[in-house]
Image: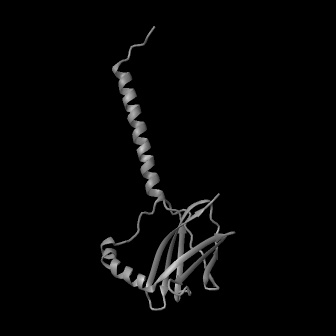
Amino acid sequence: MAREITGRHVLIGTVGAFSVIIGVNLFMAYSAISTFPGVEAKNTYYASQNFNAAMRAQEALGWEVAQDYTDGQLMLRITEKDSGTPGEIVDFQVLIGRATESRDDQRPVFAREAGAFVAPVDLAPGKWILRIEAVAANGTLFRQQRQLYIRG
């Protein structure tokens, strides 16, 4: 004997379906907000006004960056393009993290060895982002973001 579908059954099915959809949307929104820091600049208007001047000053340094990660050691070389000599750096910081979440972010302590910056870093397999900030002897801020792939 077949049961008849009543208005009550349709209402329960509709409310149940929309409850699942709303629940999934709330979960996804929470996950997105809680894992991604989302802020690149505190005041984007001010940052945009100084972008071109900062870019020209950084390009005038003529620096290029090379990276290597081997056996838990991260090595970064910042050299002058023309001569290959190490850049004159008075301050150096690196933030290493994932592209989509800040949970794995770390700021390793680098030591200067033979013109390179070396730090012990434990990186799991996958894609990492290196946010490099160095200050030249003349006070120019050098910023570069690089990607690092660690194979599993």
| Left or right for 121, reference 29 | right
In x, y percent, where is residue 137? 48, 91
Residue 120 position by quadrant: bottom right
Across and down, in percent, residue 75 comes to 62, 76
Where 85 sits versus 45, above or below? below
At a point 50% along the width and 79% down the height, the residue shown is 64
Q: Quadrant of the C terminus?
A: bottom right
Rendered view: 48 above or below 125: below
Q: Residue at x 59, y 74 (%)?
A: 108
In the image, 132: left or right of 120?
left
How many marks the image carries: the answer is 0
Image quadrant where residue 61 sits = bottom left
**Quarter that holds the N terminus:** top left
* Residue located at (63% from left, 70% from top): 69
Residue nearest the observer in this picture, 45 or 21: 45
The quarter of the displayed image where residue 45 is located: bottom left
Give how far across and how far down residue 89 sits, in percent.
52, 87
Q: In the figure, is residue 28 to the left or right of 109?
A: left
Relative height, residue 151 to residue 140 (above, below): above
Q: Nearer the viewer, residue 49 or 3?
A: 49
